Image (tube, rainbow, N blue to C red):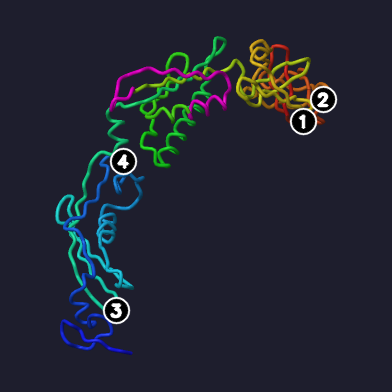
Amino acid sequence: MIRSICPRCGQPAEQELCPKCALDLAELFRFPDLVEVTLCSVCGSRQIKGKWQLPDDRSKEELASRAAVDAIWFHEDFSEPKIEIDLRQIGATRYLAKVDIKGVFRDRTVEEHCEIPVRIKLVACDRCSRMAGKYFQSTVQVRGNRTRGLTRHEIEQCKSIARSMADAGYRSGDQLSFIQEMKEVKGGLDIVLGSTQLGRHMARAIYERFGGKLLESCKLVGKKDGRDVYRSTLLVRFPRLKRGDIVSFRGSFFEVTGFEGKMASITSLREGRRSSLSEEVAEAIEILGNRADAKKAMVILADDDAMEILDPETFKTTLASNPKGLKLGPGEEVTVMRTVNGFIVLE
């Protein structure tokens, strides 16, 4: 191998400089004069490269240590770096990271030491700032119809859907995915939201879960950067029927099992046959009761079409329609629903 002469010291060199001079002249690593860790003082989110990241369970000290390490730049020929850090707090939001670095540079083992100041900068993230300023873009209004209001169970389900969707949107990185206010009002529930997109998705989810009608209206509230700014109101009006309703249709008993747009899905209690009801039919159909009101009763005697049971409230013997044709013996329990025309056996 032809060996050259180091132009700096005159020693033999396999490259342009000998290993010692290359080490003396090379910038093995560098770091900024100050490392800042920007955190939201309200929710604990961290800002990285201008974007807010979800908060995690790491302490401020752990975040400061990680930021100090991440801020160090290494020469491309510096390999196998091993870093030990001693973080010391020197103020309420200031730390000093004492860093020991070991590694290999062009086959020579190198040990270096540096000190990196770290400051924790506490601000309010975009999401918390908007929430504190009562910012909102849309309102989802959930209402009953002219024949019935919302049940407590339906209101709680809507609240659960709203919280779940807002949380999922936030965890996917949408800073506007928040509930500004959720309040029960006369006739239903109002959900005030940080974004129109969230409002539309939420209204659609509630509509698909409970059926009914979905309407959207917009109101011009001003301008921003020369563009019109609107706020949306999304109205979800529940249908007359609800899940679990037992209805009489074409001489048979059916249970409402779901909704597909304006159509109500029903299932026959006897054969399990599925069908659907149009909005017009659903508005006029006879509702016998709801599965949520069903109770357990003891069987006295049973045949294919009817059962003799003990009334679960008065404990007197009475007849119950047996649409499923259940085969049960005396002393066994069944689930029954009381109607104005007597009991119906559900299962």
Residue located beneath label 2 in the image = 301
The Cα atoms of the two marked residues, 2 and 3, are separated by 94 Å
Q: Is residue 175 magenta?
A: no
Residue located beneath label 4 in the image = 43
Q: Up-down: is 277 above or below 74?
A: above
Q: Is residue 235 left or right of residue 180?
A: right
Look at label 2 and name its amino acid: Leu
Residue located beneath label 1 in the image = 331
Quarter of the C terminus within the rendering: top right
Give the magenta part as a residue range. Answer: 201-228
Look at label 4 and name its amino acid: Cys
Q: Residue at x 29, y 36 (%)?
A: 126
The Cα atoms of the two marked residues, 2 and 1, are separated by 9 Å
Q: Up-down: is 104 above or below 48?
A: below
Q: Secondary structure at mark 1?
A: loop
Look at label 3 and name its amino acid: Arg
In primary-sequence order, the first of circles 1 and 4 is 4
The answer to whether marks 1 and 4 mark residues whose Cβ atoms lie closer than 8 Å is no
Look at label 1 and name its amino acid: Gly
The Cα atoms of the two marked residues, 1 and 3, are separated by 89 Å
Residue 223 image-quadrant placement: top left
Residue 180 image-quadrant placement: top left
Q: Is residue 31 left or right of residue 261?
A: left
Q: Residue furthest right?
A: 303
Q: Secondary structure at mark 4?
A: loop
Q: Secondary structure at mark 3?
A: loop
Q: Residue at x 34, y 23 (%)?
A: 229
Residue located beneath label 3 in the image = 106
In primary-sequence order, the first of circles 2 and 3 is 3
The Cα atoms of the two marked residues, 1 and 4, are separated by 58 Å
Q: Secondary structure at mark 2?
A: strand
